[in-house]
Image: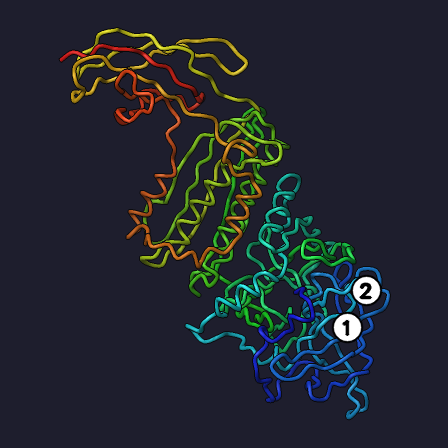
Amino acid sequence: MLRTRLAVGFAALLPALIPTAAHAAGDPILPLDQVQAGMHCTGYSVIRGTAITSFDVDVIDVLSGPDASVLVKVSGPAVDETGIAEGFSGSPVKCPDPNDGNTPKTIGAIAQGTGDYGNKLVLVTPIQTMLGEPVIPPSGAKPMSAKLKRKVRALATPISFSGVSGAVADALRKAGSKLGRALYAAPAAPRAGAFPTQTLQPGSSVAVGLAGGDVEAGAVGTVTYVDGANVYAFGHPLDGAGRRSLLLQDAYVYTVVNNPIDTEQVTSYKLAAPGHDLGTLTDDAPSAVVGTLGALPDRFPLRVTATDLDSGRVVHQNSAIADETAVGQPTGTSSLTQVGPVAVAQAAYDILRGSPARQSGEMCVRIAVRERKAPLRFCNTYVGGSPTSPAAPLVADFGAASGLLDAYNFGVLHVTRVDVNLKLRRELRQAYMLDARGPSTVRRGRDVKVQVAAQHVRGAEFTKTVTVHIPRYLSAGEHILQLTGSPADAVAGEGDAQDLASTFTITLGDDSGSGEDDPGPRNVDQLAAAFGALEREDGVTASFHDPGDDSGDSATSEIEVYRDPQLRISGSAKLRVEVRP
């Protein structure tokens, strides 16, 4: 449910004119001009499981004009303890029509709170306003203005991620707090026996899904109105982005988590999981989300394979990502960018059954697009971890890769498949350089052998021989040959590193209005090169600089001279050499 103070009003979210044309084959409706203060009405929503429950609704006042809405107060066993929680958005309110033998008719959807203690005083979006939203907006229709979008986004519907747990779930919640948007971790929906496919009807739980499968993500609310195959829900926007192509799903409610204080950071909410795919969400409008039952949106598979290098155990994780390419990625951020990093973090957490600080491994990402025969890909090794930020460096790399797709400006990309292969062990495969020894006199253009002494972290010393090429352009005389290793990957709390919550904040946020001048890669081959550039040097490099140059201004470029994919060598060592022609 959208939450704001009554003083904010509803003006920015509703059209100035309420349509008067009759709609429909659905339930009978009661126009706003016939709703009166003092009416005793009934609301409907799911409190537990899939059963629709009713509760009492009393009309306090009717707000007409551009800020048209109905102020109501709720009561009854279903809401006395929790009030109207997040997830009740769209709950239909039916009032008796005094002109038609008191036949119950739908007046609208519970959509916005007032901030009262207990969450009992709420605003209802008029049903005429909701039914005035098109099922499929015209192609090229503009989304909500930037000013209105900023206001709506701050109040946006919470997103539930099912199939996530532990530190990953904690990071999601922290990211939501930073974004000003609730992000919840819910258990996966029950199996078919306990949760059969639902028929969406007014009062049913409904989800707008970014992805389905082992890791699901969707905004859970309530169905307000069904007109044949058309479904109207929420009573407010998801993102206010206009034309969409997301999953329309049923949902399962585990319980309503109670917090009567109703602050911006802590409020009551439905602990719910997206369920079965039923159709396509086509319109993300100012006063409703609208979809159609039947055909599903375009999707592509995200497959994450995680291997425990200590035990050999393999975990396969499969999700179907809603693809909004055909409607122009209306929010500027793809579902892959929002869901993929969470799936990677969860796979790493699952395979290690936790997140030990001492871990090492690798991750390879392959993204197939219709516009290029060979997939876009990169591979990196990783050393180091954090109990509170599982797989944060891996997640950041995946987010950067999918972000390159979102930012591509010189054509339309159609992703057909995403494969992530990660392998981790509970050991820090890292060593530090202690010393370097080699010839004191070297010649330009020749190769020399250098003995590097190093020691494993908490382990034995060893020696490696590396070959260093002496550049022809070096001036004759004395130089410092410096060997530099690669540090462990940054983890939470070290220097300027990003923790997992910060990484999720970036990937789940909306940067479509960043306004950067750099247009990025001009074609898919350049895009592939940008993917390749995500691969980091993790070996030992050599450079030369003048003696006494502590600033390094005179240093030559670094050239990799040694790499062991199974061992990260860190630190540095120096060797003074006399360069001769």
- How far apart are labels 1 and 2 at the CA level? 10 Å
Q: Residue at x 22, y 7 (%)?
A: 441
Please, what secondary structure does the residue beneath circle 2 have? loop
* Residue 445 shown left or right of residue 529 in the figure: left
Q: Quadrant of the N terminus?
A: bottom right
Q: Would you place residue 415 above or below residue 80 in this image?
A: above
- The answer, for residue 199, to whether it is visible in the render is no
Q: Quadrant of the C terminus?
A: top left
Q: Would you place residue 294 above or below residue 416 in this image?
A: below
Q: In this view, which residue lies farthest toward the bottom?
A: 99
Residue under label 2: 79
Expressed as whole percent of the image width and height from the top left, the position of residue 483 reads 34, 18
Q: Would you place residue 347 above or below residue 6 in this image?
A: above
Q: Amino acid at mark 1?
A: Gly
Q: In this view, which residue lies farthest toward the left?
A: 581
Where on the picture, by quarter, is residue 365?
top left
Dot 1 crowding, Cα within 10 Å, few <14, some 14–19, many 20+: many
Q: Residue at x 43, y 21 (%)?
A: 570
Expressed as whole percent of the image width and height from the top left, the position of residue 161 reads 62, 51
Which callout, 1 or 2, points at the residue further toward the start of the chain? 1
Residue under label 1: 43
